[in-house]
Image: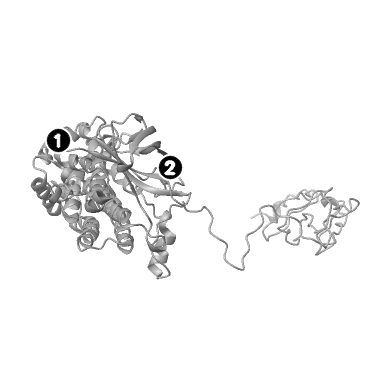
Amino acid sequence: MRSLDQARALCESYLPGLIDGLSALPFEQRESSGGATLPVFRASGGPGLVIPKDYGGLGATPLDAVRVMRAIGAHAPSLAVGTTMHHFSVATLFTFAESIKNSGMEWALLEAITSRNLLVSSGFAEGRPAQGILAPTMTATPAPGGYRINGSKKPCSLSHSMDLLTASVAVPSSDGGQQTAFLLMPATLRGITRHPFWGSSVLAGAESDEVRLADVYIEEELVIPTENGPDGMLDDLQTTGFIWFELLITASYLGMASALVERALAARRAAITDRAALGTRLETATQLLEGAARAMMAGETDNDALARVLMARYGAQDAIADAARQAVEMLGGMSFIGSPDVAYLIAACQCVAFHPPSRASIAAAMVDYLDGSGPFLMSDAAPTAAAPVPPGNPAPPVAATPAPSGTPEPMATPVATSAAPTPTAPTPSADAPVPAADGTAPPSSRRVPSPGRLRSPSRPRRAAPPRPSSPPRPSSPRRSPGPRPRTSSPRPRRPASPAGRR
């Protein structure tokens, strides 16, 4: 496939030998836990892909990085997802390298990433329901010369192979509250432990287990405070990090879907119009991501740019899922049965929807941005379960009560004839007191009559006339129009006379 071949060629120019090294490993080994692909990634210089050349990296632009991650995702999905966490972390750090230097952060750690091909894991977005993606999952307690860090991150990609860990942490602020800070620490510090968490075989090679920090001491030089911009918008560090993440993680899944579409096009089993539609649907995602990457290269990294990148991500996400499904259908059942790769890739493509932020969590902010009523604001607060009640439409009470009245609410007794509609209010019990008109408690002597003694408010009950020769009619649904059956005993028929026969 043309666009995927171009991505592979670009990947080879940046990371020589990576694609061939990955292809030499069986697919099952590439995707299993144990880090079989990470030595190949390190040997090709992968950790320095997006680090600027001025700092010893390969200096890939956002557009080139998107294409390289697509190529990696087509051959090793777990490696693409796991190393995305590394790439977006270091890209964010080195984008603000000069500011970080001036902040006093330990620069030797950043230099070691390129000189020693170190891997950096990310401890930001948390996988718990109702957890804001900007809310830190770790806390920092001031200690002499630094902080004591406690908390956990799950899932945490590259948890077993990481050399450095980046994370957001809540630190005490000068006004007595909490402030979000960005930290970078060696993964070998005392108190950092790994624990099993990822139970699925899909993307198991990304090493997405739990990382716990228990009373881990770090120096002040390893912490960078972050601040929200005007009107509560994210600061430049956070916004740039989000844009890098959305581009690279979606490109990884684009590669997985591309591997399926490439097989479907090569099989030539479907009609040519269907194959053209399949390729077009996939390239929709390609154009969305590459367009967003070009905008980032043009300097669009503010809050409005983040909103546009998220729209491109969700559009690409839909196109990826559609193309993967159509490709599997086009390949047919025998291909699904005979090749475990097909089943694995279609399952892995679904995971693109699980990365933050979800559509629901930013729906209100996106609508504000789209209709012009406000800026795009990503909040730490999780979305509420119930929408606010519009003015003039008060919410119904949790428990309905009988309407205040001096007389009980009548209820029709079921009869064969048509009766008045049954009131929707709950029927009080026979011993329930009737509330007074002013809402006060009624005297205990006023009781609601038993429902059996109530008559229909629309028509009095009439007794049916006696019919001695007919048995009582059973209570059954109304018969359809037609002759009524005879109720008297049948009279024996007189045999016809022989003269009357012919």
Q: Amino acid at mark 1?
A: Val
Q: Quadrant of residue 395?
A: bottom right
Total tally of numbered discs in the picture: 2
Q: Position of residue 428 (x, y in %)?
A: 78, 51
**Helix, strand or loop for disc 2:** loop
Residue 233 drawn at (x, y percent): 38, 60
Q: Is residue 427 visible?
A: yes
Q: Which circle's residue, 1 or 2, is located before the other in the chain?
A: 1
Please give left or right for residue 239 compared with residue 50 in the image: right
Q: Residue at x 77, y 49 (%)?
A: 490
Residue 287: image x %, image y %? 21, 60
Judging by the rendered image, the residue that carries numbered circle 2 is: 128
The residue type indicated by label 2 comes to Arg
Q: Nearer the viewer, residue 2 or 66?
A: 66
On the image, numbered disc 1 is attached to which residue? 40
Image spot of residue 303 (x, y percent): 33, 61
At horizontal 42% and vertical 67% (from top left) the residue drawn is: 374
